[in-house]
Amino acid sequence: MSVQPLERFTRWKRGLLAGLLPLVAMAAAQAQETDRPAGVASLRLSGFGSLGLVHVDAPDGWGYRRELTQGGSGANWRHDVDTRLGVQLNYSVGSQFELVAQAIAKKRGSYSHDSDALEWAYASYRPNADWTLRAGRVNLDAFLMADYRNVGYGFTAARPPVELYAMLPTTLDGVDVARSWFQGDAQWRAKLMLGSAQIGDFATADPGRVRDIAGLMLAREEGGLLMRASASRTRIELDLTSAQAAVDTLAQLGSLPIPVVADQARLLRDRLGASDIWATFLELGLRYELADWQWSAEVVRISAAPLVRQTSAYATVGHRVGDWTPYIGYGRTRDAMPMMGTPIWQAALTPVLGPAGAVGTQMLGSLVTESVNRSRVQQSGWSIGTRWDFHPQAALKLQWDRVHVQAGGPGLWTDASGSMAGRASVATAVVDFIF
């Protein structure tokens, strides 16, 4: 059935366009004013974008994506993986107060909310040059690329390493307070963060929340070397409405006097029913830029058993030669929570539940096991590419990725089998720009 062009726009795209037009007009009018006295209100418009094309060679039906907030597709050719457009408005009142809003139009999962297009929306107060207080929707400064992970022009590769950044939240609804100072030639920065954020696979279910986030970040920069570390403690809250019936059935099976069934059912129930648990996020990141060399590395550890116990890391190295920067990178993520084996319950349950009941329960166990394994991430990948800065505000990037997904670890892909290993090749051409 054909779809009219206007119907192809989702509500959030139409709302974003309607909201941005008057803001752009305001910024244009403000920019035309001249001889503005120092210290009065000012409005600044800036933006960024990426135009990308991706070819994916993967197992049939597997959908590639750069982050879990995206929907996936089994198509070989994709233009929506990296393509995005962002607009940012900064409204300053003197040197101490500022209002910031940033909206991004990009591919999102079917369970995304309209408000997700608003990436930043906060008020900032700087009592002096050392301290900054922000409140509202801010970037979650717990990761190396937190400030610019959507601004492709700001980093070397075609996209942030998916083995780490695909699973991380981008925004914090709350407050943060930062202090910076110099010690010799080194600049130090410390930040305290409090609030909540969205997590989960937006292509398959309503997003969950990480609540009661309390995080600390410490960074040191000197001579082109940035070192930073962060630690956060939070409570993960997931909506189990759609899975509640399965969780209740597994709880009942776990009480049966049949060890082969009860033990597996309890394990599955613990994994599927994890909805209100405390988690710890630890991060260490390094970025080094000296002369023509650029490299970065980062490792993140997430401990939230029985839901996940995951370690992710990457390293990228590039060397600039004129306007060209060839680079190579490697990323990897591993989940220490074990892959679940498919239960074999039918024979043991037939005398208790009857043939029909045993068959239905066996099917439930198999489906839950597949769901649990499909959500795990066990993936590694090599990237090789080059960046061409053909304009002071634009760059072309060409990249090829070779990805290895282990059995029981396809969580970054859509419609992938949880019990099947796979290999994929991803070729990317993207133009990143700022304005």
Image: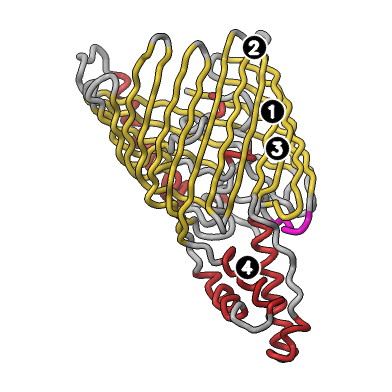
Q: CA distance from mark 4 to mark 1?
A: 36 Å
In primary-sequence order, the first of circles 3 and 4 is 3
- Disc 1 residue crowd, few under 14, some 14–19, many 20+, Cα 10 Å: many
Residue at the spot of label 4: 268
Of the residues tagged 2 and 4, which is closer to the observer? Answer: 4
Q: Image point 53% across, 16% down: which residue?
A: 225
Mark 2, residue position: 323
What amino acid is found at the position of numbered circle 2 in the picture?
Answer: Asp
Q: What residue type is disc 4 on?
A: Leu
Around disc 4, counting alpha carbons within 10 Å, would you say few (fewer than 14), some (14 to 19), or many (20 or more)?
many
Above/below status of 363 relative to 167: below
Of the numbered discs 4 and 1, the one sitting upstream in the chain is 4
Residue 173: where, in percent of width, then height?
37, 45
The quadrant of the picture occupied by the N terminus is bottom right
User: For residue 329, which numbered disc appears in the image?
Assistant: 1
Q: Nearer the viewer, residue 25 or 204?
A: 204
Q: Amino acid at mark 1?
A: Gly
Q: Is residue 303 above or below residue 159?
A: below
The span shown in magenta is: 415-420
- The secondary element bearing badge 3 is classed as strand
From the viewer's perspective, tell me whether residue 99 is left or right of residue 11: left
Give the class, few, some or many, for how many residues have Cα within 10 Å of label 3's Cα (few <14, many ≥20): many
